[in-house]
Image (tube, rainbow, N blue to C red):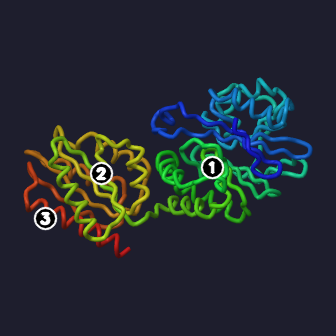
Amino acid sequence: MNIKEICDGIYYVGVNDRTTHRFEALWPLPDGVSYNSYIVKGSAKTALIDGVELSACDRLRENLIATIGDVAPDYLVINHMEPDHSGSVRVLRGMFPDMTIVGNAKTLEMVRGFYGIADNVMRIADGDCIDLGGLSLKLVITPMVHWPETMMTYVAERKALFTGDAFGCFGALCGAVTDSDMNTEPYFPEMYRYYSNIVGKYGMFVGKALQKVANLEMDFICPTHGPVWHEQIDRVVSIYDRLSRYEAEDGVTIVYGSMYGNTEDMAEAIASRLAERGIRNIRMHNASVSHLSYILSDIFRYKGLIVGAPTYSNTLFPPVEAVMNAVKTRELKNRVIGTFGSFTWAPQAVKRINQLMDESKLYCDEVVSVEAKQAPGADAIAECRRLADSVADRILRS
């Protein structure tokens, strides 16, 4: 049980999950994940903000009893309907039959579709308020962050914004809940990974949501995953703002595939030259080994992207093809690009990588490419170094 009073009248009643191996059955959770749920307790009424995953219902119930006793919450406000939060809705309704479920039109359609619940619901519009007595809930609809029904809830009296998945990250909470009570540095790489894996496709909508809440005074940002942000609000908002505009830090991500080491030799030559040129953030991923989750995180974080692979069955090496398709799906923009590859008799890999780069509209200027026949000799390695120079020049002058 990890109940914390965030501020007067607002309590954390969420749970940790250190058992689930992959989030959405896709993304690794080496440090677990938290499902954050909150109680807002006014003088007249009480609201539960978001639920938890189905398997965590018993622990949520214990947390609620410890926080508000046997009294039922008056409202369940659903900021996001994905089942890692809404999985508890049917159980909560069984526990508290008089509790009103609050959501927008799209939310309530999903409540019916997922859980068969259509009674005792409150349909809200953007900007509506619910008075709890001394505390109020303002509902702000922020669609496609990252589902169409997503919204945020603002308690003006405590300057607290409940943001759903926005500003969240992977990683279970280790005792503390609020950033002021913990070392948050392990969570920031997980914020980049969470954004790139889950939210990254919807940068335009994230930007609109940020604009919509920009004038709200915020002492607390309360997401559905990860720490409650208090002291580092400016930092997390800045990260989301940059990511929503596809801006990136100086650095290069090299993604490659290699069956017998020849393409890897080219990748090493490129990385070595980038380091010589003063690029300090260089991340290398063997696409057959690194999980896509971590590759995407680095691609979103750094300006440079260099992709290489051998030809395989007269097309692109499959693990690299999978990375390129994932990048294409997320509609990433404005990267400095280089491509390279090797072949034995049919030069198809670089051609296919460049085709996918074109389809993705990923790059902001030219694409420099290098291709080696069979083992890369001195000339091919020299070309790899020139490719690195081209990428470094564009990053360092940007």
Pointers 2 and 3 in contact (CB under 8 A)?
no
User: How many angstroms separate mark 3 from mark 1 (CA)?
Assistant: 47 Å
User: How many angstroms separate mark 1 from mark 2 (CA)?
Assistant: 31 Å
In the image, residue 171 lies at what x, y percent? 54, 43
Amino acid type shown at disc 3: Ala
What residue sits 75% from the left and 53% below the top?
154
- Which is more N-terminal, label 3 or label 2? 2
Give the numbered dot on residue 68: none
Amino acid type shown at disc 2: Val
Amino acid type shown at disc 1: Pro
- Does 300 sit left or right of 265 as displayed? right
| Residue annotated with mark 3 | 382
- Does 67 sit left or right of 258 as displayed? right
Structural crowding at the residue carrying mark 3, measured as other residues with C-alpha within 10 Å and reported as few (<14), some (14–19) or many (≥20): some
| Residue annotated with mark 1 | 227
- Which is more N-terminal, label 1 or label 3? 1
Mark 2, secondary structure of its residue: strand
- Does 217 sit left or right of 45 as displayed? left
- Which is more N-terminal, label 2 or label 1? 1
| Residue annotated with mark 2 | 255
From this viewpoint, is residue 149 visible?
no
Mark 3, secondary structure of its residue: helix
From this viewpoint, is residue 277 visible?
yes
Quadrant of the image occupied by residue 206 = bottom right
